[in-house]
């Protein structure tokens, strides 16, 4: 599992930057002006990232720029077409959580296909992925956000009950599925390939008592 995601939070000193995605220290500056010598506050803050030096703009405690703030960046191991859907959903989530959720369901459908399933029925695909190692808790979480199970809607179909929280959960779930099914096996493969050849042979034979 990758490091925990700390979403941007008003006046918080450290979080995952909404511009560069790096967990970094953030510097806060309040915007105000003087009117006849009196300080006039605008309820507006600039927040500057110590890593990329880019600024996020906050009004009345909420981030207004960049608009996709609060959503984690996509797992880099996701296929490119899914990253495109994911980022498009990220761009629109604050204005249209339902539109973002529809895109993310489509992304989950594509991800199932990428993982060797049919891509036709998310419910069946996720059930099959559970058989090959996807934690059953992810299936339950997908059921909860109405992607699979009793509350399922057809992929890409807009569900009127979607809200911002459901969309945010879908971003996280896609990243978790990618982490468990793509990133972790890749890391394990890398580790496996660093083992001496005689040990790999021994593992293949099911004998771990070999000496170097
Ligand atoms: Zn940054």
Image (cartoon, helix red, strand yellow):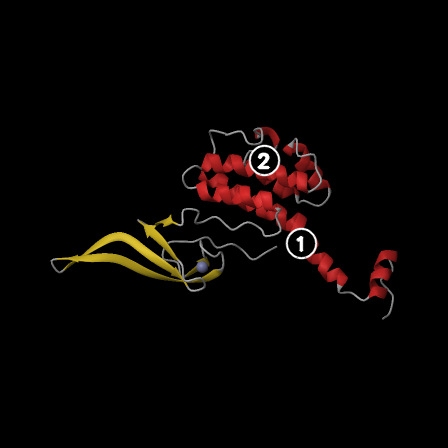
Residue at 64% in and 33% down? 123
Viewer-closest of 88 and 119: 88
State which tag comes first along the sequence, 1 or 2.
Answer: 2
- The correct choice, above or below, for 66 with respect to 100 in the image is below
Q: Position of residue 26 (x, y in %)?
A: 40, 62
**In the visual, does 121 lie left or right of 50?**
right
Q: Is residue 168 visible?
A: no
Q: Position of residue 106 (x, y in %)?
A: 57, 36
**In the visual, does 63 lie left or right of 101?**
left
The disc at residue 143 is: 2
**In the visual, does 203 lie left or right of 3?**
right
Q: Which of pointers 1 and 2 indicates the residue nearer the eye?
A: 1
Residue at 54% in and 41% down? 85
* Quarter of the rendered image showing ligand 1: bottom left
Snapshot quadrant of residue 46: bottom left
Q: Which residue is mark 1?
A: 184
Viewer-closest of 52 and 26: 52
């Amino acid at each position: 599992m990758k490091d925990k995601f700390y979403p941007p939070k008003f006046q918080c000193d450290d979080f995952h930057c909404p511009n560069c995605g790096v967990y970094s220290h953030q510097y806060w500056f309040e915007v105000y002006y003087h009117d006849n010598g009196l300080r006039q506050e605008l309820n507006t803050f600039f927040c500057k990232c110590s890593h990329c030096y880019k600024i996020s703009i906050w009004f009345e405690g909420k981030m207004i720029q960049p608009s996709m703030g609060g959503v984690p960046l996509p797992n880099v191991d996701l296929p490119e077409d899914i990253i495109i859907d994911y980022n498009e959903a990220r761009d629109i989530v604050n204005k249209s959580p339902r539109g973002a959720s529809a895109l993310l369901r489509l992304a989950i459908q594509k991800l199932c296909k990428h993982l060797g399933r049919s891509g036709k029925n998310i419910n069946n695909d996720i059930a099959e992925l559970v058989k090959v190692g996807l934690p059953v808790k992810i299936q339950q979480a997908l059921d909860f956000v109405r992607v699979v199970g009793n509350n399922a809607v057809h992929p890409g179909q807009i569900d009127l009950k979607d809200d911002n929280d459901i969309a945010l959960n879908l971003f996280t779930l896609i990243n978790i599925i990618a982490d468990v099914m793509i990133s972790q096996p890749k890391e394990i493969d890398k580790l496996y390939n660093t083992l001496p050849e005689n040990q790999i042979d021994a593992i293949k034979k099911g004998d771990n008592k070999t000496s170097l």
